[in-house]
Amino acid sequence: MSSAFSFGFSKEIPYTQTRLSYIFPMKLISKNKRAYFDYEIEKTYEAGIVLKGYEVKSVKTSHVNIQNAAVVIEHGECWLYNMDIPLYEKTSPIFAPHYQAKGKRKLLLNKREIAKIAAALDKPGMVLLALEVGIAKGGFIKIKLGLGKLYKKVEKKQILKEKDIKKQMEKDVKNYC
């Protein structure tokens, strides 16, 4: 029996941060489609990012590119390199000469998460990638990181073959009905 103050939460799933992220999903701004195609993503993490005000405005207007972004752990901190955030068009000219579009940006993760990621990266072939950039509840810019390894050419061909078969089956079912 449900109480009057259940707020739509079911009793099977406890009230946790995961539950909140399901209710308030992240608004997607940019996605690294190539990473999903080239790598087998085993685990994902969500991290905040340290940005200046004009960088936040540029990201919120969808002017961001994470295709060539690299995530590195240095001295117990997680850093994002080569994420392209062009200068916001209404930014004061004072900031323009000193601005680096592809600068080094700090990612905000717990020390335990960084330790887990560092331990996983010690395995051969493991890579940490920037998968998605989005706006979370409260207007915070978040980056979805993926821990994975590179597909071999044979595996990639097999995956493409399976996708083609699945598309053909769906097409046949649609035409049959």
Image (cartoon, helix red, strand yellow):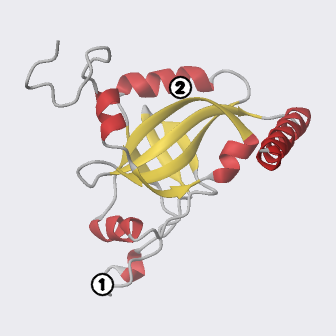
| Residue drawn where x is 67% and y is 43% of the image | 36
Please give left or right for residue 125 compared with residue 148 in the image.
right
Residue situated furthest left in the rendering:
4
Name the amino acid, label 1. Ile
Residue 104 locus on image (x, y percent): 47, 56
Q: Looking at the image, which is closer to me, 53 or 98?
A: 53
Please give left or right for residue 22 compared with residue 150 in the image.
left
Q: Which residue is mark 2?
A: 118
Quadrant where the image shows the C terminus: top right
Q: How many neighbours does mark 1 have within 10 angstroms: few (below 14), some (14-19), or many (20 or more)?
A: few
Q: Report which quarter residue 67 is drawn in.
A: bottom right
Question: For numbered disc 1, what is the local secondary structure?
Answer: loop
Question: For numbered disc 2, what is the local secondary structure?
Answer: helix
Dots 2, 1 in contact, CB < 8 A: no
Name the amino acid, label 2. Ala
Residue 102 locus on image (x, y percent): 52, 64
Q: Which residue is mark 1?
A: 94
